[in-house]
Amino acid sequence: MHERTEISTLEPPAENGTDTSLPTTAWNREQASMAYHIDRWGSPYFFINSEGNVGVRPMIDSDMEIDLMKIVEEARTRNIRLPLLIRFQDLLRRRVVELNESFRSAIQEFGYQNRYQGVYPVKVNQLHEVVLEILDAGEEYNFGLECGSKAELLATLPHLDRDDMLLICNGYKDSTMLSLILTGQHLGKNVLPILEKYHEFEEFLAAAEQRNLIPRFGVRVRLSTVGSGKWAESGGDASKFGVSIPQIMRVVEHLKEKEMTDSFELVHFHIGSQITDIITLKGAVREAARVYAKLMKMGLSIKYIDVGGGLGVNYDSVDFGLDQSINYTLQEYVNGVVYTIKEICDIEEVPHPIIVSESGRALTAHHSVLVVGVLDATRREPELPKPTISNQDEPVLRELSDLFETLQHIVADTGRGERQRLARCLEIYHDAVEKRGDTDQLFSLGYLSLEDRAKAESLYWGLIQKLDKTLKSFDRDSLPSDLYQIEEMLVDQYLCDFSVFQSMLDHWAIDQIFPVMPIHRLNEEPDRRGMIVDLTCDSDGKIDRFIGDDGEENYLRLHALNDNPYYLGCFLMGAYQDILGDMHNLFGRVNEIHVYADDDEPDNFYIETSLSGTNITEALSLVQYSASDLRKRMDAVIREKVKGKGIRPKQGVEFLEQYLAALKEYTYYNFEGVVGDKKRKKQDQG
Ligand SMILES: *Cc1c(COP(=O)(O)O)cnc(C)c1O
């Protein structure tokens, strides 16, 4: 594991001379690493390079570096539009090797008398290239696959290149599925259905008998150990998964009667994904190993224990206090599995089984990065100086303005206790909200001019900003809730070219936090605080929870926009996210490139495959609009105008061509050079 280095230079950069408006230069990449916690979730794969960009180290056996910005630049010169999903195929391979090597070393260290033979559950990322890459990297380890549905079985069955590689079939199986599995076994392949219900067992045996085959299968055991974390599956008696112990006894009796005890080859469990607590996992392994051992003693000859999925990923950091944090490393997980099984088997004096695991998230999460462009940033706070208010102004404006002075007094009045000063701040806040409400009403009733209203809004936001600054000197957790939310009121909104519902479904659905950070300008201090809003017309289309110093934070430190494009990276997107998505607002799949490391190339990489995202015609066809029908209708609309001499025929032809060309476009924003902050500042206040 990577050592977390403590950085001693974290005091705010010293101010040069008296001009504090100069951009601070004393910002370095160590500070950026700390600000975005990149070592916690990204190490050793992601880091900040000397250019101030995010770098990637995809290879296991070399420290070759690839600059993420260079990839984005090359993609753009090749006219591949953002948002862009970048797959690092080498990183995928690297994780496969790391998982297998961890098992190898634990097996050696503990003197385990059998081997590890893992499978990849394709539901985590079904993309064909992902599956092929994992199989290729896993060939040396005889790594196999896991499927959970009929479609996945059809996709995986033809990929069993070697007879002894495993294909584990989970989920509820209909007769077609059971029969296909038998065909796989008939072909001499190592396809094992995991029976979840007693009746599945009966059906499978009957189907085998009909075809005169000796069936082979595994059984998912209903454990009493319950998973932990937000992905936990209901365990214990209430679980909808697994065969109970009494039913397993029935299976064994039946097999003994038929002299088919060898058919029962595998004991399986799965207590959920992203298991947060290693102790829970070990408890489940212990329970399953006991079941295995007792069954062996009853005369079965089970070959495998399958510990399911659940190996977690550090989306934030080890033991970081968020409910998705895991408290263990990859090697600790592997050690726990190997050691626990060995311990129980030795006590029970039964042979060590082959260990199978079904890790999906841990293999795929790291390999894909979503890069999105920032289209615009909206600031809350006024950038204009505080308007001067005189005796000629409306009383309500004078009252708002007076609040500034009251606040000034509180700041200066250090004689009073903290609680008293906080109570006064709260009073000022409530007064400001009330006066602002008054001005809005007076305006609606016609008593205030537009200029007055502008002054009122500027004063209000100026006051909020000043309150925010004042409150910085208090412990944030001691603030009353109205004051606590002031910080949030001032966070900028960064409008980004993507859809949360398409690309980061779990952020919206189950509040998962993903690492997000700028992929460049990291040698500049990020002096803005922002949240991210997406292109969908939906108030949930946003990212407003981020990894903070100690827990969750409601803003991300970002740079002010300038005249160049600004790109953000969303990391660890490879598991469960990057192929899901729900056509919200008909955005659809994003463009995708597959990047390979190659040190013969000038920038250490080449783009192998580029897959186009959903175009508008495709998105519309999913909701039953056909392109030819739309064309006919648009044509009719235009023809009518031409006939009525509203437009010239040539114009009509041009309009139709424009419409047809747009139908072929990418669904996302046409991100051709974003306009920076400077040009927009003025109209974007409030
Ligand atoms: C989803 C699932 C997995 C994969 O779990 P990860 O936590 O992603 O490793 C493995 N096995 C079964 C039965 C599953 O349902």
Image: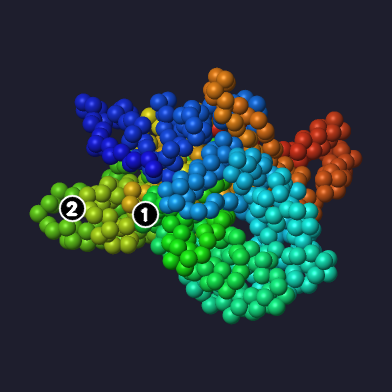
Closer to the N terminus: mark 2 or mark 1? Answer: 1
Which label lies toward us, 2 or 1? Answer: 1
In the displayed structure, does residue 472 sit left or right of residue 332? left
In this view, the residue in front, 255 or 41, is 255
Find residue 69 and report its horizontal and vertical position in percent.
Answer: 51, 29
Q: Could one spot residue 71 in this view of the protein?
A: yes
| Residue at (22% x, 53% y) in the render | 474
Residue 486 against residue 375 in the figure, above or below? below
What is the count of numbered marks? Answer: 2
The residue drawn where x is 52% and y is 59% is: 352
Give the side of residue 644 with respect to residue 560, left or right: right
Mark 2 closeness class: few <14, some 14–19, many ≥20 residues within 10 Å: some
Look at 36% across and 57% down and name the residue there. 321
Q: Secondary structure at mark 1?
A: loop
Q: Residues within 10 Å of mark 1 (few under 14, many from 20)?
A: some
Mark 2 within 8 Å of ligand 1, using the beta carbon? no
Residue at left offset 73%, top offset 53%: 189
Whole-percent x, y for residue 529 in the image: 39, 43
Occupied quadrant, residue 306: bottom right
Residue type for callout 2? Ile
Instruction: Inspect the image, locate mark 1, and give the three-letter code of the amino acid beneath it.
Output: Asp
Q: Which residue is mark 2?
A: 410
Q: Which residue is mark 1?
A: 319
Q: CA distance from mark 2 to mark 1?
A: 40 Å
Q: Nearer the viewer, residue 492 or 666?
A: 666
